[in-house]
Each structure stands twice: as C-alpha cells, then as structure tokens.
Amino acid sequence: MSANRPAAVVVLAAGEGTRMKSATPKVLHELCGRSLVGHVLAAARELEPENLVVVVGHAREKVVAHLGEIDPGVRTAVQAEQNGTGHAVRMGLEELGGGVDGTVVVVCGDTPLLTGETLKSLAATHTTDGNAVTVLTAEVPDATGYGRIVRDGVSGAVTAIVEHKDADGSQRAIREINSGVFAFDGQLLADALGKVRTDNSQGEEYLTDVLGILREAGHRVGASIAGDHREIAGINNRVQLAEARRILNDRLLTQAMLAGVSIIDPASTWVDVTVTFERDAIVHPGTQLQGATHLAEGAEVGPNSRLNDTRVGAGARVDNTVANNAEVGPQANVGPFAYLRPGTRIGLKAKVGTYVETKNATIGEGTKIPHLSYVGDATIGEYSNIGAASVFVNYDGKDKHHTTIGSHCRTGSDNMFVAPVTIGDGAYTAAGSVITKDVPPGSLAVARGQQRNIEGWVARKRPGSAAAKAAEVASREPEGEA
Ligand code: UD1
Ligand code: MG
C-alpha cells in the first residue's frame, strides 16, 4: 500500500447547480463522454482510496442511479439540506462512521478537469509535510466568487480562507484562491468540523473554516499550488461547461498527436476520454469519436464522421460515415455516406460504399456492397458483390428474419432478398429480382416479370406527342448511317 494512499475521498455533489438551468442535476452533465462527477471519480480512483464517498442531495435518486452505473464501488451519503460544504463533509464522514484514521481528500463534484496527478501530488505534499490540512490553491486571473487564500505577511504560511462574500477590500485583491480540494488528517477534520459555526454571510457551515480552526489549535496548515489554474475550474453554467469541454478535448487530442496520431483539424475534432488510437491513425476535420471507439494503426477517419463504440482496423478508410457499435476490418473501405448500425462486422478489405445502411450484418473478407443498399440481419461470405440498390427485406411487420449469402456470389442490382432466405456459394441473381426462395450454389436466380414490347403503342395512344414525333423520326432514319 502506498504511503500516500488516502483512507477516503469525499466528493461533494449535493448542490443543485441552479445556474445550469437544467432538469438534469449539474454533476450529471456530460463532457467528453463522461458526466462531470464521472471525471472527478476517475481522478479520485487514481489515488486508490480505501473508501470513496459521494455526498448527494439535490435530485439524489438520479445521481445515485448514475453512480451505481459508472462506479458501483462508490458509497453515498445523503445531505438532505445543503447547509454548506462543511456540513456536506460531515455527512460524508458519518457514512464512514465518523472520524477516519489517515488522510481524507475532499473534492467537488463539478471540477471535471482535475487530474489524478494533481490529486496525487497534493496527497504526497500533505504526507511529506506532516500537515493537518493541505489545500490545493491556484493563482487565477479573476478571483471573483472564490474563497481567498490569506497568508501570513511574514512567514507566508496560510492562515485562513475567506469566502468572496465575506472578504474585505484588501482580501478581495488576493488572486490566490481555494480550489475546493483538500487533504485532511481524518480525525482532526472530524474534530474541527464539530467546531465550525454558521455566522457568515450565507449562514452555512463552511469547510474552509476548518483551516483557521486547525491553525489556531496549533496544527500545520499547508498549501499546494496547482500548476495550471484551469484544472481546478468549477462548472457553474453551460458557458463554463463548453469551455471545459474545449480544454479537455484539446488535452486528449494533444496526447493523441504526441503519440503519433494525425489530427488534421483539432478545432473541429471531438473525442471522448475513452477513445483509443494506434500510431499513424489520421482523423480528418469535422469528426466526432465517442465511447470505446478505437482507430488501429494507419486507420483514416473523416471528414465529417461520427463513430460511437466502433473499432476501425489497421489501414481502413472511413469517410463521411455515422457508425454505432460497429467493427470495420483492416483495409476495409466505408463510405462516403454510409450508416453502420449496431452489430455491423465488416471483414478485411471489404467495402460498404455510398448510401449503404447496415445493421446486425456480418460482411466477409473482400465482399463489396458499393451503392445505395440496406443490409439488415445478414451474413455475407467472402468476395461476394452485392448489386446497387439492394434491400435485405428483414421485417415482416412482426418479426425480423435473417438472410445468408455465400461466398463469391454476384447479386444483381435492385434485388430484394426477402428473409429468411439463403443464397448458396458462387450463385448469381438477376437484376431486379425479388428473391423469396433459397438459391442453390452456382445457380442463376431470375425472379422478375418477362419483358414484352408492344410496338407502335405510342403512335396509337399518344398521337402528336413529342414522344410520338421522336419515335417517328427514329423509325425513318436508315440504319448504319454516319
Ligand atoms: C466553494 C468554497 C470556496 C472555493 C470554491 C471553489 C466553501 C465555503 N467555499 O465555494 O472557497 O473557492 O468552492 O470552487 O467551501 N456542496 C454540497 N453541499 C452543500 C454546499 C455545497 O454538496 O451544502 C457541494 C456543491 O454541490 C459543489 C461544492 O460543494 O460541488 C462546492 O459548492 P459551491 O456552492 O459551488 O461552493 P462555492 O460557493 O463555489
Ligand atoms: Mg456556495
């Protein structure tokens, strides 16, 4: 066990987040594929705490349900009324049975840019310096609204945190602020929280008052200054949410580029934290990569594509495509303008071309579906060619049925495969066929009306029309003339 491993992390997430103006609780708003609180938990998990407690209050049913989905190991403590950050931490410690031996780290649920690295360095400073409390601070260009870090004029030691609303003119000039992230000695924290009063402008129990209380009792109070003040920014409204998304997205794209991925236009490329790349992948402008999407070596995606939970094989090309839960094989070719729906598996060097929609379809190595088709609930073998404008008729209005097409087949354009139906290996189908019966291997299936030409029909039925005149001219022209 690492010496800096905290006994507990307490995440404060009981507030309403009024300024989001949303039916969704603030901490559940999304950023690069994770909720705000999901980002905080991911950073907290890097500390490997023995306990992780989230204090919930406003809309707690929704928040608790979400926490159960993303991190079932999390414990929750209810703060029924939001009486301040000190009160919230008190509720969190109660869930852990009161005082805790060892370090307790407190973070807010609305600071999604905070990294595990920063938390680790805070915990390390806290332990190394033997502090009762260590606060993470930052110098910000505009400190409005934040608690100010008051330091002793001579020693430079932190003496107190004063909330913006309670600060006087000289204190408001201070640009070093409280990030809201702390490492505490668990037992001293519990004792001090019992002494916090509510005689402040908001009538709340301030967690920040714990610093002054501990200092006055003769304990060591320390501070750790964050390298990048943007990391500790709290999200209060949707403008800040968008700013944070930009910052996080840039961070993710920078990591990818430094690892050998070409991002042609970082400004118009959006990725989730869960997306992974191999080197020499290329992402063209206007592309959104979401969920567990993975681009293998040399895969090229975009422009204007949205891939969710989709794996793109080495050297594959995906152009102007929307894909959800799909697998694109190595060197396969998708798009432009394809729609790959869940359960699509495209084999090595296969092609799913323009205006082709696929769903629950396995498409074998080297098989081509180049144009204007719907392929749903299908298995297609290797090196087959599906003619333009084909539809896999999978739905009878009640149930879905499967179509199986073998290897080395050549199906004609404008075919309807009325499932359930099977086309054997090496079979052909004629253009315009409605295939309702199985086709044996190596056969040609023709399933369409015979053509008959009724000569002279236009002259009889549409006399004097432009068509009739054109036909008359054509009938006069001797054949074989230059
Ligand atoms: C708090 C700090 C301030 C710091 C700022 C950093 C206090 C008194 N002030 O101010 O020094 O600069 O954060 O962003 O601590 N919460 C609860 N229960 C409550 C109150 C708050 O769970 O009763 C949660 C909120 O959901 C939020 C966090 O605590 O996640 C911070 O609360 P907020 O009201 O945003 O605090 P600030 O006024 O911003
Ligand atoms: Mg407040």
Image (spheres, rainbow, N blue to C red):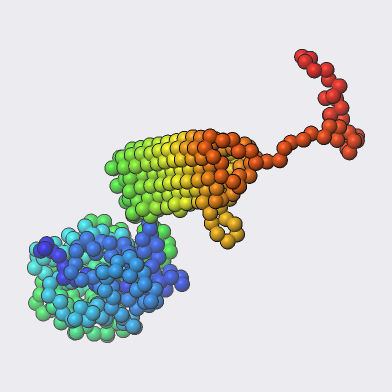
Q: Is residue 275 above or below residue 221?
A: above
Which residue is outermost to the front? 440
Image quadrant where residue 217 sits: bottom left
Residue 145 at x, y = what percent?
33, 70
Q: Residue at x 43, y 64 (%)?
A: 238
The quarter holding residue 197 reads bottom left
Of residues 200 and 188, the one nearer the viewer is 188
Question: Residue at 16% of width from left, 68% of height from top?
Answer: 6
User: In the image, 365: left or right of 430?
Assistant: left
- Residue 50, position as x, y percentages in the image: 18, 69
Does the image show residue 452? yes
- Name the quarter where the N terminus is drawn: bottom left
The x and y percentages for residue 453 are 79, 34
Of residue 385 and residue 259, the one placed in the foreground of this image is 385
Query: Horizontal and vertical percent for residue 468?
Result: 86, 32
Q: At 46% from the left edge and 70% from the top edge, which residue is drawn?
A: 22
Q: Residue at x 40, y 38 (%)?
A: 348
